[in-house]
Amino acid sequence: MSDHPLPKTPVVSPQRLLEDLKDLAKQNPMATAASAFGVVLLIDLLPTRLVTSSVAIAGVALLRPVLFSLGVIKAVELCCAKTKTLEIKP
């Protein structure tokens, strides 16, 4: 066995990410403004029809697996709920 402690896994939360982005924007406002301008320009150059069709295609492709997963989760919940109610107490 090694005496070294295991490294902690980083916890990523939306609130922490937002705080980090705010700190970065305060430290380097020109790079932040240039990045935001570049993202907006890229989004503006993309045709709207391409974006909406891509989102629709991805949504349709993911619909069956998501519904199947939700069905499996619900079946497991129902199965576990029935086994808990069938317990016999002495």
Image (tube, rainbow, N blue to C red):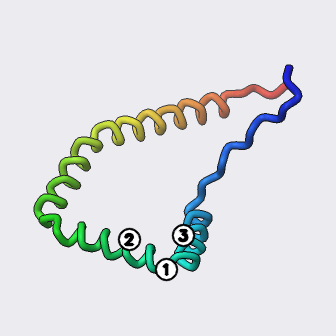
- Rendered position, 71 above or below 10: above
* Residue wearing tag 1: 29
Front of the two marks 1 and 3: 1
* Residue wearing tag 3: 21
Type of amino acid under label 3:
Leu
Residue drawn where x is 29% and y is 42% of the image: 62
Q: Secondary structure at mark 2?
A: helix
Q: Residues within 10 Å of mark 2 (few under 14, many from 20)?
A: few
Q: Residue furthest right?
A: 3
> In the shown orientation, is residue 56 left or right of residue 70?
left
Which of the two discs, 1 and 3, labels the residue nearer the N terminus? 3
Residue drawn where x is 40% and y is 78% of the image: 33
Q: Nearer the viewer, residue 70 or 43?
A: 43
* Residue wearing tag 2: 35
Type of amino acid under label 1:
Pro
Q: Position of residue 26 (x, y in %)?
A: 57, 79
Q: Secondary structure at mark 1?
A: helix
- Rendered position, 77 above or below 36: above
Q: Quadrant of residue 45?
A: bottom left
Type of amino acid under label 2:
Ser
- Rendered position, 81 above or below 16: above
